[in-house]
Image (spheres, rainbow, N blue to C red):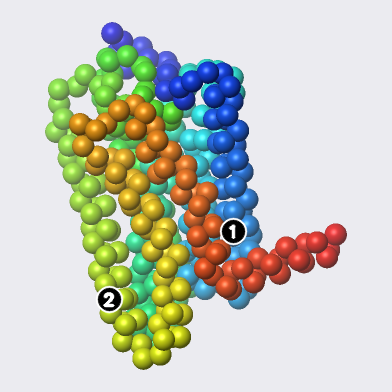
Amino acid sequence: MANSSSITHFLLLPFPGTRQLQLLHFCLFLAIYLAALLGNGLIITTIAWDRHLHTPMYFFLLNLSILDLGAISTTVPKSMANSLWDTKDISYAGCSAQVLFFLFFISAEYFLLTTMSYDRYVAICRPLHYETLLGSRVCIHLAAAVWACGVLNALLLTANTFSLPLCQGNAVEQFFCEIPQILKLSCSTSYLREAGLTVASVCFAFGCFVFIVVSYVQIFRAVLRIPSQQGRHKAFATCLPHLAVVSLFISTSFFAYLKPSSISSSSLDLVVSVLYSVVPPAVNPLIYSLRNQKLKAALSKLITGCFQNQ
């Protein structure tokens, strides 16, 4: 039994199977990672390039794409390298950094999705005050608050987790380092500090969830009062991508962390972790681009312009 001071590395859970299945996992993750890089990179470039997209909605979408790129880049490359080279090792510092950055990107994304629901609420329920309530300075302040809250939450939870003594070995039952799996290695009998931070994080997450739900209740009420069917369809079209992204993010992450321990298993945890950590960053650009005519038009102009310049 080793304590935390003697642990120099952790062992990540490899994807089970033969060498051929490991290489298949590498190829699958590589395809998903490249799709996420391409999709989010195109959204970032298009929004930065087209002045017509310099509005609060697309400003927040640009931030979402940056966070998605950061989240998937924190976990997937290491997992691909382990599968390719048939290894499980990750250093203690690397594991700590993975926990810190993944928590930061996931927390900030959740706060950003909450902010984006406020943007949709103002745009549909208070359109005459939209430029006043969401001016450029306000948007910058909101984005800065999102990133700062993500940093604070990640620092507190990571520092608390790795300050606990670890004496249950160094095998992490996940393909990347995450807090629930690290806590399983702890032999600490003092859970007061850990419980306090966990309760605070859960309350904050629940508060954001309630804010999103209340915002969309108000949005749906306002949309249903629009007399024309075309107007209702247009209003719904601006909300559906965000609602789809929120639903995907919340359903997968909440199930990953709140599922009953009676149905927990290594295989199920592995599948669920892929669903909430790998799939959303690759799917989010597709969700937004499919339903957004302005973004598709700007993206088409950007690609056409690049080919013409060549």
Image point 37% across, 38% down: which residue?
Answer: 272
Residue 282's spot in the image, x, y percent? 52, 49
Which one is earlier in the sequence, the residue at label 1 or at label 2? Answer: 1
Depth-wise, is mark 1 or mark 2 nearer the camera? 2
Quadrant of the rendering where the N terminus is positioned: top left
Q: CA distance from mark 1 to mark 2?
A: 30 Å
97 sits left or right of 66 in the view: left
Q: Quadrant of residue 170?
A: top left
- Judging by the rendered image, the residue that carries numbered circle 2 is 218
Classed neighbour count for the residue bearing mark 1: other residues with Cα under 10 Å, few (<14), some (14–19), many (≥20) = some
| Residue 161 in view in this figure | no
* Residue located at (76% from left, 66% from top): 304
Report whether residue 85 is seen: yes
**Residue visible at 27% across and 58% down?**
209
Could you tell me the amino acid type at mark 1?
Ile
Residue at figure coordinates x 35%, y 74% from the top left: 121
